[in-house]
Image (spheres, helix red, strand yellow):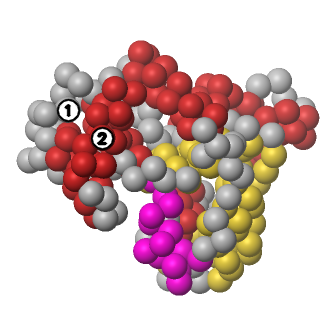
């Protein structure tokens, strides 16, 4: 469970996030949408304690990312848009390294790697160096690395960027399985088909503020549109986000 209240963040004269409040519940997939520069990435970085907020509060499972940063990291699994794999290490070594950072024992790490490799269909490349991996392979390793310690809250930033159709379908099934297991899943994406297929609730950020927050049905009713893409455009008052 994530609870955000009156959150703000500025960089010099640029107000990236302006007094936003929302909730992201366990057992739900929450879509975080907005055009480039809207404040999505800044918001995510504050949630996973990379940036401190200027004002407002964040609670993740009752903990504050500012004062409980280490504890928060134990409950979070983060897949950043950059992936950030260590190219000289194999997929297995990348995942194991993160397990070690979380204080896991070697036997438990290997058990988790085998389980995740099976779930994500990584057996063919689990012991290859990640240098030269395809987009799909990189995403799978990044997800396995984020999930190795069994986090309750999972944050995915543009996870399907550059993936082929089959890998995208497998990724969506995995995300739905996380929801089914009771995890809180945060999905930041520009792909409206993905939002329509996966998200229970949608938070739209525009110009650092919450432009809309609700279920797909609620946003469609509020906008008077028939699909989520048109609703998104109408609610942010621009089509700039669709060109990103």
Farthest residue to the front: give it: 107
Locate residue 138, reporting x and y percent.
28, 37
How many other residues sit within 10 Å of disc 1, few (<14), some (14-19) or many (≥20)? many
Which residue in the protein does label 1 denote? 126
Locate residue 208, reporting x and y percent.
65, 64
* Number of the label disc, if any, that sits on residue 187: none
Which residue in the protein does label 2 denote? 111
How many other residues sit within 10 Å of disc 2, few (<14), some (14-19) or many (≥20)? few
Q: Is residue 14 above or below residue 74?
A: below
Q: Is residue 51 above or below residue 233?
A: below
Locate residue 190, reporting x and y percent.
55, 38
Q: Is residue 25 above or below residue 121?
A: below
Q: Which residue is found at the position 74% from the left and 31% from the top?
A: 228
Farthest residue to the top: give it: 166
Residue 201 seen from this side: yes
Q: Nearer the viewer, residue 122 or 9?
A: 122
The numbered mark, 1 or 2, whose residue comes first in the sequence reads 2
Magenta stretch: give its range.
Answer: 64-77
Q: Is residue 144 above or below residue 136?
A: below
Q: Secondary structure at mark 2?
A: helix
What's the distance in space between the residues labelled 1 and 2, CA to CA?
Answer: 13 Å
Locate residue 61, reporting x and y percent.
64, 65
Do callouts 1 and 2 mark residues in contact (Cβ within 8 Å)?
no
Q: Which residue is found at the position 71% from the left and 52% from the top?
A: 25
Q: Which residue is found at the position 31% from the left and 65% from the top?
A: 103
Side (left or right) of 10 relative to 200? left
Q: Which residue is found at the position 59% from the left and 83% from the top?
A: 54
Side (left or right) of 78 relative to 109? right
Residue 37 seen from this side: no
């Amino acid at each position: 469970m994530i609870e955000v209240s009156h959150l703000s963040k500025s960089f010099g004269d640029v107000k990236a996030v302006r007094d936003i409040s929302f909730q992201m519940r366990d057992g739900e997939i929450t879509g975080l949408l907005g055009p480039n520069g809207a404040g999505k990435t800044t918001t995510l970085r504050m949630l996973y304690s990379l940036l401190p907020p200027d004002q407002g509060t964040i609670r993740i499972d009752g903990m504050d990312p500012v004062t409980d940063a280490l504890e928060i990291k134990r409950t979070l699994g983060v897949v950043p848009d950059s992936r950030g794999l260590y190219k000289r290490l194999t997929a297995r070594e990348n995942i194991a390294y993160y397990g070690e950072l979380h204080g896991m024992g070697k036997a438990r790490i290997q058990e988790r790697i085998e389980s995740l490799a099976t779930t994500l269909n990584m057996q063919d490349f689990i012991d290859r160096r990640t240098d030269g991996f395809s987009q799909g392979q990189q995403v799978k390793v990044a997800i396995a690395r984020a999930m190795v310690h069994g986090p309750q809250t999972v944050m995915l930033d543009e996870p399907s960027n550059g993936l082929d159709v089959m890998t995208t379908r497998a990724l969506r099934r995995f995300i739905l399985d996380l929801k089914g297991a009771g995890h809180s899943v945060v999905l930041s994406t520009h792909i409206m088909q993905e939002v329509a297929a996966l998200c229970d609730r949608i938070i739209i950020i525009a110009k650092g503020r919450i432009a809309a927050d609700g279920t797909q049905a609620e946003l469609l009713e509020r906008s008077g549109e028939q699909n989520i893409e048109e609703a998104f455009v109408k609610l942010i008052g621009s089509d700039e986000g669709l060109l990103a």
